Image (spheres, rainbow, N blue to C red):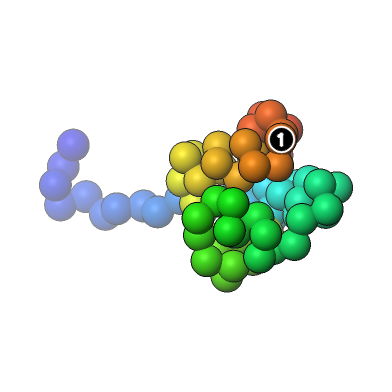
Amino acid sequence: MNPNAEKIHFKDEASLKSIGQKIRAARKQNGLTIAALAFKCGVDDSQIGRMERGETNFTILSLLQVAHHLSTDPKELLP
């Protein structure tokens, strides 16, 4: 790979929004507030809010953690 090549950053906003909508729906189905889910995941409330709005590109580990605390198969959260 050419070290001088331009780096391309991939961000699929539609997918992030789709995942976020699914996280929000699962959270509400479980009767959790954003604050309660954030506490369970050990993150700040704003992080869960950004995930739900599709405003952040989170890690796979974060997605697995959220899915675990929502008692949801991670595949169910994917677009």
The residue at the point 15 percent across, 52 percent down is: 4
User: Which residue is at 72% across, 34% downward?
Assistant: 72
Residue 55 is situated, as x and y percent measured from the top left of the image, at 58, 64
Q: Is 30 on the left-hand or right-hand side of 69?
A: right
Say left or right for 71 vs 60: right
Q: Secondary structure at mark 1?
A: loop
| Residue 51 showing in the rendered view | no
Q: Position of residue 22 (x, y in %)?
A: 76, 47
- Left/right placement of residue 11 relative to residue 32 reads left
Q: In terms of depth relative to the viewer, which is nearer, 10 or 4?
A: 10
Instruction: Count the marks.
Output: 1
* Residue 70 higher or lower than 37, as above or below: above
Instruction: Tell which residue pokes out farthest to the left in this image.
Output: 3
Quarter of the figure with residue 2: top left
From the image, tell me which residue sits under label 1.
71
| Residue 52 percent location from the top left of the image | 68, 59
Question: Which residue is found at the position 50% from the left and 46% from the top?
Answer: 62
Q: Please rate how many residues cluster around mark 1, counting C-alpha atoms within 10 Å: few if below 14, some from 14 to 19, many from 20.
A: few
Report the quarter where the C terminus lies: top right
Let me know if residue 43 appears in the view.
Answer: yes
Tell me where residue 50 sits by quadrant: bottom right
Mark 1 residue type:
Ser
Q: Residue furthest bottom?
A: 46
Residue 1, horizontal then vertical, whole percent: 18, 37
Residue at 70% in and 42% down: 70
